[in-house]
Each structure stands twice: as structure tokens, then as C-alpha cells.
Image (cartoon, grey):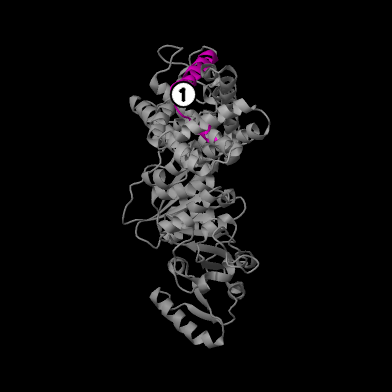
Amino acid sequence: MDDSARTDSNGDAGTAGNDVPTAGEVLPDRFSTDEVFQRVVADADHEITSGVRELFFSALAGGFAITITFLLYASVSATTDETFLGVLLYPLGFIYIIIGGYQLYTENTLPPVALTLERLASIPALFRHWLIVLAGNFAGGGLGALALAYGGVFDARTAAVAVGFAEKGIATPATSLFFKAVFAGFIVAGVVWINFATRDATSRLLVIYLAFLAIPMGNLYHVVVSFTEVVYLSLVTTTNPAPALVGFVLPVLLGNTLGGILLVTVVNYYQTSDRRLEIERFENVRRLSIREWLAGSLAGRSYVPVIDTVEEIVRDPEAYRVLVPIANPRTESRLVEFACRVASTHRKGTVHVVHIVQAPRRWTPETDGSRQERIVRESERLLDDVRPVGDAHDVTLETSTVVTPRSFEAIFDLARRTSPDLTVIGWGEDQLWSSARAERPLAELTNQLPCDFLVAEDRGLDPSKVLLPTAGGPDSDLSAEIARALREVAGAEVELLHVVDGAEDRAAGEAFLEDWAAEHGLGDATVTVDASGDVEAAIERAAADSTMLLIGATEQGMLSRLVRGSLHLDVVTEVDCTVLLAERPSARSVRDRLFGGATRDRNPAAAFRDVAATPDGREPTGDE
């Protein structure tokens, strides 16, 4: 547990640099429940956003420190023939963990759960945090047990006492284990709460010692200690650890978890008032939606913009909204103009331009107020230059500014908040796309599109001659809509391309393409059927005389594969014209969401199977 959010002990009333209370309002040396809760959430915000490596090794150290408790409890009990003296030293390992700031699973039934109750972290993010910490604790405890078993630390008498601890737990009925563990979980989580409510190290030390002394004195069970005992038992005897883990450790784990959550976190949460988070760091920030809370991966303040001027939008069902997130209004004006052209073909066309400014990941709203004002003023000045574009195309143009450490991810957040029909984003160096990180949560994010997406590789955005390769599918439907819009407002010449495997398939390909063109309002377009069977080469040849290339998504989706670097779309870099990559939201089953994959129709030339394959020609795996 990181102690950074509660380190002030100078006796002065006030707040720390991040507006987390360091002294009470009524009595300087005492916090109200609301203030304690603020401190808990501030600490949880830091912990739950920590990296996997940081969390795991902190938990590993915590699990190994539990070995000290096990060692002293067994050694002193065996040496003195008096378990009470061993009990007196039982809390030492926990003191190391809490004062040292290591991670302990049972402590994490309070801060991350408080953050989750506030809908500032998702439930899957909470489970991820728990799993990492528990794995680290068990690994540390297992290593400690290994050292005790084979390091010659225990003599025969002490080893017998240590084995007896595990045997006693295994012999205890599961129901008794569970309820004993509930009280132990209550004690540990209560220590965490009181630890946030105290201001000096002496008080903390006393509280930690007395509370953890109650566990052995009350004949209660702690899951990490129990796991360490079971591992030690299995190493020095022939005992099969599996039944012990299921019949002993599992009930203790469930009891510790439930005790911490229900008896402390929930009770303490509901005894706080509605003012519990009324401080600058947390007020006026967006809580996760119910869907994000139940099934998302967001956690901590990092997903909340530092500055957000996007107003609450009441969706007009008759309007056609286009969202245009940009990194630089000065250099991306063509992208805005393109979006305005598309929107102008619809009744009540509206283009929402959002200037997304990349902020340092640890930059909080209170870091520098004057700096924030300068950023907003400069952003407004730059956006002034793009506002006349809307008037030129007779569409409503709205502008906003968002400053966030998660610039690329903010695009999808904005799309869900503002419910556009289409999102248009630039792709290339110095674009928002370049700030994307190829990690699983982001790949999952891009696999659940909230609206139609166009990703533009801007090489002039000249719509005079548009090439549209197609083999059907929803993403080609989107490409057709864009092509019709450009034909209407810019007089674009549209060429349709269909690739077949050989000359014998040419007649069928021509029939398909003519029918597809008629169905999509492009009956007057030039129709080309290429019988080479080489999709990329055919596109490159046809695009030589084009100014714009419209490509639909692959079978497995486009944005998520681009983020993961597994979509080898070489044609994008080989052609000289502007390239628009189109993707339409696709329905994904629960199985798809759990195990990967996407449900979508096959489209351009068998879903660009060659383009989507890995460089060596293999079909991509679920991780590629």
C-alpha cells in the first residue's frame, strides 16, 4: 500500500499538493469520515493505475514478508512451549508490509473497492488488480516457504510446530474457516481505514500491531499466511497440496475478501456524506457509465481529461453528426473540410471538431491553473481558424478542447459521449493515432466501435477521382456512402474495383459489381474487374490514376489490428493518393469478447485475406 497520499505529519492543517486532506477541518489532528474517504480514494487512484510489474513485485515482497510472521510464530512457540509469546511476534511481518508500503491482498479490499464504488474504476479493473496482487503475495509466500523448508532455518521441533499450524487449518471445517476469515478480513481492512485516519507513525504502528495481534489470539485466518503454511507443509511432508488449497486456503480467501468489502468498505462508504469527494481533484469528473463500470477496463484518474470543454450533447435524431478529433488545428484543416463535405450531404449536418492536447500522464488539474488557462486560450485561437469552414459548406460546426494524458483513447470516449454517426481521424506522424499504445485494453477498445470510423492518410484529400475496391460487406457499404457524398458535393468520379482469382471468374465478378453498384446508388460509376487474384497489386495499379482510395476493414476488424501492428496493409504506403480506411461497428458475442475475434461479413476481396495475413503468409492468430 503506497503511503504517498498520507505522508504529511507536520501538524499543519491543510491539504497536500494534490488537494488530498493532510489535516482535518474541525480539529487539525483528526479527520472526518469524508476526509478519510478522500485519502483512501487518492491512494487507490495511485495503486490501481500502477503497472503490472510494479504491482506484482511489490506484492511479491509483501508475500515474502509474511514469512517473517510464519517464522517467528513457529520458532518462538516451539522454543518456549508457550504459543502466547509467539503470538506477540505475529504482527511483525504485517508491520513490515504496511509501513514499508508493500502490497497485501487483504489491504486491497478497501482502497480499490472504494474507487470502484465511486465508479472511478471498472469492476474488471478491480479484479485485475486483485489477481496481480494475490499472485504476487502467493509467489512471495511460496518462495518464503521454500526457503524455510530447504534453507535449514527450522530445527526439527520448530518444523513440527510449523507443520501443525497447517494441519490445524486443514482439519477445521470450511464453514468455520470462512467466518473466521471474515473477521480477519474485517480487521485488516479496518487497519487500512484507521491508517488513513491517523497522522503520526507511532499511532499507526500501535494500531497495526494490536489489530494483527488479534488474528492469532482470536484463532482467525489470513489467506497469505495460510497459503504459506500449506506450501511449507507440502514441501516437508508427502501431503498433496491440492485438497489443502481448496479446503483450507480457498474458504479463507473468500472470507477475507467478503469481510473486507462488506464490513468495512461498504459500511464506511455509506456512512460518508455526499460531500465525500468535493475536492478539486475529484469534483466535476466523469464517472464511468454502467457499461464501462461493468465491462470496461478504465481505472483511476488517468482516463479523466485534465481539461474538457465538451458540453453535454442532447442528440438530435434528425441531425447527422461527424466527430473530428485533431491534434493540430493548423495542419489538419483539410480533415475538417473533408468532414464538412460529408456532413453537408445530410439534413442538419453537424461537425464537432475537438482539439485533443496531449498532457503528461501524471499532470493533474491542480498542477498549474495558469498553464491550463493558457492552453485553453491557445486552443481557442487555433480553432478560430477552422470555424469558417463550416459556414463555407453550410453545416453547423462546433469546437471543443480536451487536455488528457490518454489522447488516442480519448477519441473513443468522445465518440461514446457525443454519439456521432461518423468519426474522422487522421493517421500518420504527429497525429493522435501515433500516440496509440498496442496493449490489450486498447485493442479491445478499438474492437468495440461506437460509430462508423474513417481513418485518413492525408495526401491532399483530393476527392476528384475516388477508387473503391469492394467484395461486399458493411465496411464497403460505408465506403459507398462516402463515395456518394463526395460525388454529390465535389463532383467526384468514382471507380469500383473487384478482384477475382482468374479469367473464368471475370463474368461473375462483373455481374456482382454491377449489382452492388446499383444497390448502393453508384450505377454510373466506372466498373473494373481484375482477374489477377492479387488484391494489393490490383489496387496499386488501379490507384495510379486516382486521388483517393477508399478501403473497407478486414474480416477481423481494422482499428484493433492497426493498433496491435498486425494489419500489414502495405498498399497504404505504396500508393500516392489519399487513403481512407473505413470500418463500421460489428456485433460481437460474449464468446468473442472473452476469447477474441469479431463477427463481421467478409468484404473487399475475401476480406483482404492477403493484406490481413502475417508477413510470412500465415493466417493471423487471435493475438496477432
Residue 605 coordinates in the image, percent (x, y)? 52, 74
The part of the image, by quadrant, that contains residue 532 is: bottom right
| Residue at x 42%, y 11% (from the top left corner) | 27
Let me know if residue 603 appears in the view.
yes
Front-lying residue, 20 or 360 = 20
Position of 73 relative to 580 (above/below): above
Toward the viewer: 481 or 20?
20
Q: Main secondary structure of the magenta part?
A: helix
Is 333 contained in the magenta span? Answer: no
Q: Examine the rendering and report whether any part of residue 55 can be seen.
A: no
Residue matched to label 1? 215
Residue 34 against residue 300 in the figure, above or below: above
**Seen in the image, is 489 located left or right of residue 500?**
left
Q: Where is residue 230 in the image (x, y as percent from the top left)?
A: 54, 36
Give the camera-side residue of 487 and 568: 568
Q: Residue furthest left?
A: 317
Magenta range = 200-227
265 w.r.t. 214: above or below: below
